[in-house]
Image (tube, grey):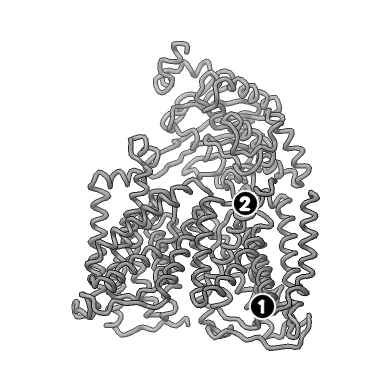
């Protein structure tokens, strides 16, 4: 790695570790946690969409699967939330294969619409499934602060370190994927899946692998969210707007890169908080306007996103 | 959940009839989408928001100039025609040969922008036209149906017929269809494909414009109103066959029926689940749709 | 013992019969030229053999395996490589990466794959351009890249669709020499070509298609004199010694 990259990483590492000390206000701390969580979700989406070229517009379904699995197992079977985390990941991966196997033979636009359809179906089912609280949602039982219980109340800093760790694991695995045969195969599939098949790549199998990685990290994010907010309902855990937000962060930040999605989250989420503060009640619409405009602008003019812009400015 | 409840017969028949009638409106909305996809294999993910714009146009014509929505039909058609052409030249024209990501998110982002702009400009309040010319029930074969729905439906059918006539009987329309069938051949024959694409977007917009004006007579108008219609339109286009105008008609009616029947027989919450399931079944089992070319 | 055997291969698209009862064999080490006017069904036949389309009738046997019903990636892993008429490089990847993707089938680790990919780029004369993005290549260079990528999967049979179509005239002899060197490496080749001089120089045998059917087959010197072929395709130009 180049020295400039190492220096940058060093600075980021120091910032990351020091942040809880600097960001004392709960408001800032929550914002940072949100940025890190969504950065991870966006990067997870990026594995499937950016690297492998399969655009899913229904990824929130995996977030909800992770969140609900660990929560339900905890509430109904007393299962430790960390084990529930693994359970959520497993279930999400299985779901991803069930969705992907038939849907991956669809062409791009059809596949995207299919993911919306699946997302809506699952959300409606969840809204009507009594065992998981239906529309009323689930409130997690409050436990005393501990890592084992995955709950912290007196100080929320441990949440920060946990989500940071999740994010770093996601980035590390993504970096590994990028450099390995998986990464090359994903990119070939994204560029031209028929040509990829002509050199021996089993296209559907690799799309499913990308889907599995992607779903796993999103599910982990879901479990984290459940333990952080301690309340869960289909509206917050698997709405279409969440799927859209994930795509948005990754696309504006820069798909197909390691840092793009995180950059997108770091820029857009504070931005939306700013607009909410500035514009009060209608703030919700202003940030969406910006999001929509950015998304279109990036798609048309700068598919490499903010990361691409920065890369050019840096002269790499 | 999971239990079918059979409603009384007259409710069922009323539901079926209104489902079919609504289906014609869906068909008109879907026709525009299908036309665009048939021409350039791009899905307009902002199609629902185009409809929303049409409905707001009709509403504001009413609120500001006391124009009944029926009178606004040509206005909405023209405005949305313009929107379609603008979107083509401003956005779509630049991403025709681009990567899948660009093609999907260009219109997806536009949809988000339009929805948010509507909320910003006109608030999330539900609007309506309380004293439209068409209002109240009408009795058809002994069944009571809303007059606005019947009018909207017949108008949609008429617009649909006009569209089909245009495509098959006018020189421009035939050129449009030719461009959809084979872009290169059309270009070789001297057809300006760029202008054909713009025309396709314009007509797609106009279809939605007409549908939107009529919908305003019996639907609330609010920023999110387009989302569901948009999703139903995608299903209709996939079911009927991407690029097939007649297919959009058949599919629109089927979707109208399924929406009503699922709501009546299972539960209102599951109306759209049934429609989305239908989409999944269709694209997986018969990817080219009922009457499609692809 | 034939390497590739087609028996009665038929492919229909709606009302159009693209391939009708096509039968021929390819022996190991041969170069077979596949010729015919546009629309004769040559590329479709390639697509059928390599698994992109399933034939409506007929059998395809390759080195003892039945190819019908296999996916393209499975066909490739059995030992058939191909290029495309409409060139399909991985545009946003460099030349080296393009070939590496193919190499990784047998050599999964990136470092070793990179080294091996370089050897294929050298073979086709693109060694210095490894870091150029595929979208920035000329047509002739793209043809060479397709060739390198197809070779990198270590096929026994290489099917080239339009080996020299659309390239600058001056680069044709180089391409022809390159294809000749492929045979020296032990590859068997089926080559679709419109350029008759290329075919005459390269092919051991020619199979001529017209309207989806085989109308002539045999050594080049014989086939070009076949009356049906001359009528269907060659016209007066070749006969007049163009």
3D distance between C-alphas at marks 2 and 1: 30 Å
Q: State left or right for residue C7 relative to residue A154.
A: left
What residue is pinned by disc 1?
A: A27
Question: Callout 2: helix, strand or loop?
Answer: helix
Instruction: Determine which quarter of the picture holds residue B6.
Output: bottom left
Q: Label 1 lies in what chain? A: A
In what quadrant of the picture does the N terminus of chain C appear?
Answer: top right
Instruction: Determine which quarter of the picture holds residue C94.
Output: top right
Q: Residues within 10 Å of mark 2 (few under 14, many from 20)?
A: some
Q: State left or right for residue B136 relative to residue A77.
A: left
- Residue C43, compared with residue A241, is above or below; it is above
Q: Percent position (x, y) of residue A139?
A: 63, 86
Marks 2 and 1 in Cβ contact (< 8 Å): no
Which residue: 44% across, 83% down? B3
Q: How many marks are shown on the rendered structure? A: 2
Q: Percent position (x, y) of residue B60?
A: 31, 70
What residue is pinned by disc 2?
A: A309
Instruction: Give a yes or no on whether discs 2 and 1 share a subunit.
Output: yes
């Amino acid at each position: 790695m180049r020295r400039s990259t190492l220096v940058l990483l060093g600075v980021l590492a120091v910032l990351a570790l020091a942040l809880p000390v600097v960001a004392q206000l709960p408001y800032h701390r929550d914002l940072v946690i949100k940025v890190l969580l969504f950065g991870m979700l966006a990067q997870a989406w990026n594995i499937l969409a950016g690297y492998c070229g399969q655009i899913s517009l229904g990824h929130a379904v995996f977030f909800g699967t992770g969140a609900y699995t660990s929560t339900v197992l905890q509430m109904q079977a007393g299962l430790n939330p960390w084990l529930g985390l693994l359970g959520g990941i497993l279930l999400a991966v299985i779901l991803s294969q069930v969705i992907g196997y038939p849907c991956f033979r669809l062409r791009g636009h059809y596949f995207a619409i299919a993911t919306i359809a699946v997302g809506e179906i699952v959300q409606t089912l969840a809204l009507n499934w009594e065992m998981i609280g239906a529309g009323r949602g689930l409130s997690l039982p409050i436990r005393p602060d501990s890592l084992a219980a995955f709950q912290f109340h007196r100080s929320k800093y441990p949440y920060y370190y946990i989500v940071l760790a999740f994010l770093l694991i996601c980035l590390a695995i993504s970096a590994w994927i990028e450099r390995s045969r998986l990464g090359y195969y994903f990119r070939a599939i994204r560029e031209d899946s028929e040509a990829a098949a002509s050199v021996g790549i089993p296209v559907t199998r690799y799309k499913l692998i990308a889907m599995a990685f992607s779903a796993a990290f999103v599910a982990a994010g879901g479990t984290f969210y459940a333990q952080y907010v301690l309340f869960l309902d289909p509206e917050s855990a698997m709405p279409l707007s969440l799927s859209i937000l994930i795509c948005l962060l990754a696309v504006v930040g820069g798909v197909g890169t390691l840092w793009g999605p995180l950059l997108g989250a770091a820029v857009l989420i504070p931005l939306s908080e700013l607009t909410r503060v500035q514009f009060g009640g209608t703030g919700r619409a202003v940030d969406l306007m910006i999001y929509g405009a950015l998304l279109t602008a990036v798609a048309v003019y700068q598919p490499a996103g903010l990361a691409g812009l920065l890369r050019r400015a840096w002269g790499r | 959940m999971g239990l079918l409840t059979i409603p009384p017969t007259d409710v069922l028949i009323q539901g079926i009839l209104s489902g079919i009638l609504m289906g014609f409106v869906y068909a008109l909305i879907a026709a525009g989408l299908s036309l665009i996809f048939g021409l350039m294999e791009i899905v307009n993910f902002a199609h629902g928001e185009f409809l929303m714009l049409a409905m707001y146009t009709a509403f504001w014509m009413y609120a500001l100039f006391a124009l009944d929505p029926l009178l606004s039909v040509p206005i909405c058609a023209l405005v949305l025609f313009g929107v379609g052409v603008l979107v083509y030249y401003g956005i779509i024209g630049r991403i025709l040969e681009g990567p899948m990501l660009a093609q999907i998110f260009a219109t997806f982002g536009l949809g988000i922008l339009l929805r948010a702009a509507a909320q910003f400009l006109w608030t999330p309040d539900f609007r309506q036209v309380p004293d439209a010319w068409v209002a109240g029930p009408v009795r058809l074969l002994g069944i009571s149906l809303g007059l606005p729905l019947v009018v909207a439906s017949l108008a949609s059918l008429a617009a649909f017929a006009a569209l089909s006539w245009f495509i098959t009987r006018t020189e421009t329309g035939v050129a449009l269809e030719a461009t959809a069938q084979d872009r290169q051949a059309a270009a070789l024959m001297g057809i300006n494909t760029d202008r054909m694409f713009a025309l396709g977007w314009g007509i797609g917009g106009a279809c939605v414009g007409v549908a939107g004006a009529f919908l305003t007579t019996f639907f609330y108008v609010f920023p999110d109103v387009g989302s569901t219609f948009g999703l139903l339109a995608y299903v209709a286009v996939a079911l009927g066959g991407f690029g097939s105008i007649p297919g959009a008609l058949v599919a629109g009616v089927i979707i109208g029926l399924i929406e009503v029947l699922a709501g009546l027989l299972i539960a209102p919450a599951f109306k759209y689940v049934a429609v989305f399931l239908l989409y999944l079944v269709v694209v997986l089992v018969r990817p080219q749709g009922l009457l499609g070319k692809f | 013992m034939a390497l590739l055997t087609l028996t009665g291969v038929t492919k229909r698209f709606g009302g159009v019969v693209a391939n009708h009862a096509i039968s021929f064999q390819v022996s190991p080490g041969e170069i077979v030229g596949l010729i015919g006017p546009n629309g004769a069904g040559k590329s479709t036949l390639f697509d059928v053999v390599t698994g992109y389309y399933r034939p409506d009738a007929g059998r395809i046997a390759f080195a003892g395996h039945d190819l019908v019903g296999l996916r393209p990636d499975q066909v490739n892993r059995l030992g058939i490589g191909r290029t495309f008429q409409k060139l399909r490089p991985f545009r946003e990847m460099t030349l080296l990466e393009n070939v590496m993707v193919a190499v990784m089938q047998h050599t999964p680790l990136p470092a070793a794959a990179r080294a091996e990919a370089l050897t294929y780029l050298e073979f086709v004369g693109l060694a210095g351009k490894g870091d150029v993005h595929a979208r920035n290549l000329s047509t002739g260079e793209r043809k060479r890249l397709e060739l390198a990528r197809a070779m990198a999967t270590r096929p026994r049979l290489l099917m080239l669709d339009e080996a020299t179509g659309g390239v600058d005239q001056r680069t044709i002899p180089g391409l022809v020499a390159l294809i000749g060197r492929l045979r020296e490496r032990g590859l068997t080749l089926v080559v679709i070509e419109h350029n008759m001089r290329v075919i005459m120089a390269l092919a051991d045998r020619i199979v001529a298609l017209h309207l989806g059917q085989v109308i002539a087959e045999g050594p080049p010197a014989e086939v070009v004199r076949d009356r049906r072929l001359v009528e269907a395709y060659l016209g007066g130009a070749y006969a007049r010694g163009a």
